[in-house]
Image (tube, rainbow, N blue to C red):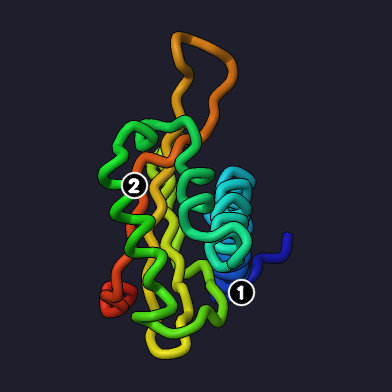
Amino acid sequence: MTRLPLARVLIAIAGCALSAIVASVALAQASGPENDPEIALLQGRVDQFFASLTNSMIGPENAVRTIVGKGPLKDRNDDINKLIDQASALDQRYGAYAGHEAVAQRAVGKDLIFLRYLYKGEKFPVVWYFTFYRTAANGALNRDWQLISLRFDSKVEALEK
């Protein structure tokens, strides 16, 4: 029986361990938040929001009321109206819309998702924050995502974190 030198055995074991680590990192990256179908669905809603927000035929009021939908924010009329007024002044304050970009997404459990977007104005960027939550109402099978928080500000330094 031929005995392999200890160094060869250790190198073989280290190679297998390294391969397993690389495979697990690749799997974690492939199943990360950017590949989550639930996040992709919500990002589609946000993209539609920006398309409506920046379309002069549709505008901020329709965009905000559509994304709020029938969720818990719909009854907060004063807050919604204030947000619509502020969104109506985006071009004036930050310059013409030049695009938007998803800059952060985070799922907390299976039913809470935070999305952050960079709204690119000609003069200055704006950060939009969207928080979605889903729950089954009264044990129903239909689990719709509801927007539970919507805001924006110009605190771009917060994106460093």
Find disc 1 in the rendering and name its residue. Answer: 8
The reply to whether residue 34 is visible in this rendering is: no
Q: Give percent across and percent down for residue 92.
A: 39, 80
Quadrant containing the C terminus is bottom left
Q: Secondary structure at mark 2?
A: helix
Q: Nearer the viewer, mark 1 or mark 2?
A: 2
57 up-or-down from 110: above or below: below
Nearer the observer, 76 or 17: 76
83 up-or-down from 97: above or below: above
Task: Tell whether 44 sits left or right of 161.
Answer: right
Tag on residue 51? none
Find disc 2 in the rendering and name its residue. Answer: 80
- Residue drawn at x 40%, y 90% as measured from the top left: 123
- Residue drawn at x 27%, y 79% as measured from the top left: 157
* Amino acid residing under circle 1: Arg
Name which quarter of the figure residue 87 lies in.
bottom left
59 up-or-down from 64: above or below: below
- Residue drawn at x 66%, y 66% as measured from the top left: 3
The alpha-carbon separation of the residues under discs 1 and 2 comes to 68 Å
